[in-house]
């Protein structure tokens, strides 16, 4: 469904209700799509911070400049 900007302003609650029911709403400005309203689905997956801790190491030379032969490969 495509609506113009004025209609979107006046019928926002109705448009959101339609989006929650699975409809995709395009909002157009001068006939050109400018935005899209879709339903928001909260992810049930929770990301655990630090789950990779202890599985990798950062070498002591990580911040040192790269060797010339590697740097040259970027510029040749």
Image (cartoon, helix red, strand yellow):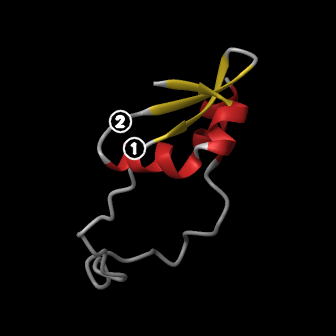
In the visual, does 13 lie left or right of 42? right
Mark identifier at residue 19:
1
Q: Position of residue 39 (x, y in %)?
A: 38, 49
Q: Foreground residue, 64 or 34?
A: 34
- For mark 2, does the 10 Å Cα neighbourhood hold few (<14), some (14 to 19), or many (20 or more) residues? some
Image position of 52 with respect to 70: above or below: below
Q: Residue at x 30, y 80 (%)?
A: 48
When the figure is inspected, residue 44 is found, relative to residue 1, above or below; the finding is: below
Quadrant location, the N terminus = top left
Residue 7 circle label: none
Q: What residue is shown with label 2?
A: 23
Is residue 56 shown above or below 38?
A: below
User: Neighbour class for label 1 at 10 Å: few (<14), some, many (≥20)?
Assistant: some
| 35 vs 12: above or below | above
* Residue at left offset 68%, top offset 14%: 31
Picture quarter containing residue 9? top right
Query: Where on the picture, by quarter, is residue 45?
Result: bottom left
Secondary structure, mark 1, is helix
Instruction: Return the x and y of residue 33 as percentages of the image width and height.
Output: 63, 22
Quarter of the image where the C terminus is located: top right
Nearest to the observer: residue 75 or residue 68:
75
Circles 1 and 2: CB distance less than 8 Å? yes
User: Cα distance, mark 1 to mark 2?
Assistant: 5 Å
Q: Position of residue 10 (x, y in %)?
A: 66, 43
In-front residue for pair 20/58: 20
Q: Is residue 29 left or right of 41 when viewed as pictured?
A: right
Q: Which residue shows up at 60% across the image and 40% down it?
A: 69
Residue shown at 63% from the left, 69% from the top: 63
């Amino acid at each position: 469904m495509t609506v113009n900007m004025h209609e979107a302003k006046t019928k926002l609650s109705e448009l959101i209700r339609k989006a929650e029911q699975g409809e995709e709403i395009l909002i157009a400005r001068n006939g050109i799509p400018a935005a899209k309203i879709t339903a928001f689905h909260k992810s049930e997956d929770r990301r655990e911070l630090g789950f990779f801790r202890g599985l990798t190491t950062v070498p002591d030379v990580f911040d040192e400049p790269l060797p010339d032969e590697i740097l040259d490969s970027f510029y040749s």
